[in-house]
Image (tube, helix red, strand yellow):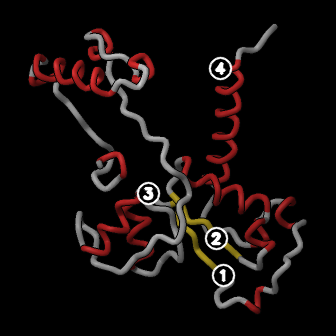
Amino acid sequence: MSTTRRAFLQGMTATASTIAFSACSQEQGRNPTGLSETALAVEPVINPASLEKPNLTVGFVPVNDCAPFAIAWEKGFFRKYGLNVTLSREASWANSRDGIIFGRLDASPVVSGAVTNARIGAEGARQFPLCAAMTIHRHGNAITFNRKLWEAGISPLSIYRGDLDAFGRDLRQYWQTASIDDRVWATVLSSSIYEY
């Protein structure tokens, strides 16, 4: 039986996602006694007493963005550097942002626009001087089309071989001739990068 590249990648993606999400779904409030054997076997290279704040609460929304934190927790990377990290599962990006603003969380990944929104007090965020200390990923965003667009001849960009003018022309033609009910354009969050 031969495995195709696509099947292999799908299997590996499913496996990695399962590991990351299962780690992200661990109960809140776990302390070093709840660490995995792998994490407990890690010897700290930094004395926690030498750190300004060794006990941290890090929020996460259980999506792919939590993978670096989940893996670091499970593998003992936090422990290695003298940190006692509690992962806090958050219900939404807004909860993550507000957890930082109101001091419930020490750190948390948030959508990129949330930092700007907090600084200017937009979209329901309390005005607060947040800053982005690091970028966890560079987004893997995509524009997803429905079957009607496919049947109307709108193809993936790869079919256009980089010709954005042809793609734009076909999409514009569809948009101008489609019924009002078929003209739906949506984003998940208005402060996310795909909005821009």
Dot in front, 2 or 4: 4
Q: Which of disc 1 and disc 2 is earlier in sequence?
A: 1
The amino acid marked with disc number 2 is: Thr
Dot in front, 1 or 3: 1
Question: How far separated are the C-alphas under marks 1 and 3?
Answer: 22 Å
Question: How far separated are the C-alphas under marks 3 and 4?
Answer: 33 Å
Q: For numbered disc 3, what is the local secondary structure?
A: loop
Question: How far separated are the C-alphas under marks 4 and 1?
Answer: 42 Å
Q: For numbered disc 4, what is the local secondary structure?
A: helix
Residue at which label 4 appears: 6
Residue shown at the point (32%, 14%) measured from the top left = 150
Image marks 2 and 1: residues in contact by CB distance under 8 Å:
yes
Residue at which label 1 appears: 55
Q: Which of disc 1 and disc 4 is earlier in sequence?
A: 4
The amino acid marked with disc number 1 is: Asn
Residue at which label 2 appears: 86
Q: For numbered disc 1, what is the local secondary structure?
A: strand
Q: For numbered disc 2, what is the local secondary structure?
A: strand
The amino acid marked with disc number 4 is: Arg
Question: How far separated are the C-alphas under marks 2 and 1?
Answer: 8 Å
Dot in front, 3 or 4: 4
Report which quarter residue 72 is drawn in: bottom right
Q: Which of disc 3 and disc 1 is earlier in sequence?
A: 1
Q: Is residue 4 left or right of residue 144?
A: right
Q: Which of disc 4 and disc 2 is earlier in sequence?
A: 4
Residue at which label 3 appears: 91
Dot in front, 4 or 1: 4
